[in-house]
Amino acid sequence: MTRQEAEEVLTTAGTAPEADFPLFDVALACAVHEDPERDADAARLVLDEACARLKARLKTHTPDEAVCEALGGDCGFAGDILTRHDLRNADLIAVCDRRRGLAVTLAVVFLEAARRCRLEMRGVDFPGRFLLRLETDDGPMALDPFEGGRVVMPSDLVTRALQAGLPPTAASDLEHLMITVSSRRVALRLQDNLFAWAERAGDWERAERAAHRRALIDPADHRAWIDVAAAREGQGKLAGALDALARARRLDGGAAFAARAARERMRMALN
């Protein structure tokens, strides 16, 4: 897959209904878009293995046990504790190769394996760490992909929420904290991480690619184009930054003030 072909995958997914959003394929296309010199088929084979392991475990285990044993135990997926800010942790191809990554990247594998095995699982943007919500006959259960799919008990969820800075009343409202997010939002969060890391490092070319991928995945959101503009400005590509700001204004008139201020600043630089 070339970078252009990856963009075509993201563009098509950007217009897909939420129920049909192809999360794994999108995350894979994002990884190829970042580095087209790699083989995406290797990641697909790893996913096939994860699905086969999960299907086998479901014959003798409860769903929560099967997920943990198959993906965390048999396949060895877990969080990267030692080098959390390694860019590979937000790259699906690298995560499938290393079996290590961010919770949200690991969640892409867990969610796709669960979908193929007909388990009802969704992502949860829980304070402090991305989690998974698995629906079972005994009610919803929280799983932590960073810990290999281990079940997180309600008392532990409250503790995590408190540690993340939520007040006690909010931290104890688990039904609200366990609200699921769309597959599109999971894909966007991956690119948010990459953009933030690249921005902090001053790697504006990488930041522009991550922001551009967000714009393709969610074409109705003006904010991605504002970040594209900032990344282009960081590279001195002021004309391209102005074009990105114009796109943001067309998508959301409410962004006009901020975009106009940025545009005038860059016009002065151009002059």
Image (cartoon, helix red, strand yellow):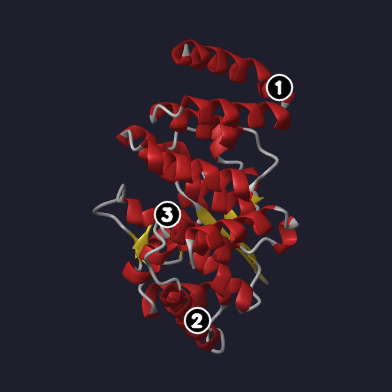
Hey, which quadrant is residue 236 in on the image?
Answer: top left
Mark 1 or 3: in front is 3
Question: In the image, is residue 7 above or below residue 270?
Answer: below
> On the rendered structure, is 146 left or right of 177?
left
Mark sitting earlier along the chain (1/3): 3
How far separated are the C-alphas under marks 1 and 2? Answer: 44 Å
Residue nearer the viewer, 203 or 114: 203
- Residue 16 location in percent, x, y? 73, 58
Q: Are marks 1 and 2 in contact (CB under 8 Å)?
A: no
Question: In the image, is residue 228 above or below residue 132?
Answer: above
Q: Which residue is mark 3?
A: 34
Q: Which residue is mark 1?
A: 254
Which amino acid is tagged 1? Gly
> On the rendered structure, is 125 left or right of 93?
right
Which amino acid is tagged 2? Asp
- Mark carried by residue 48: 2
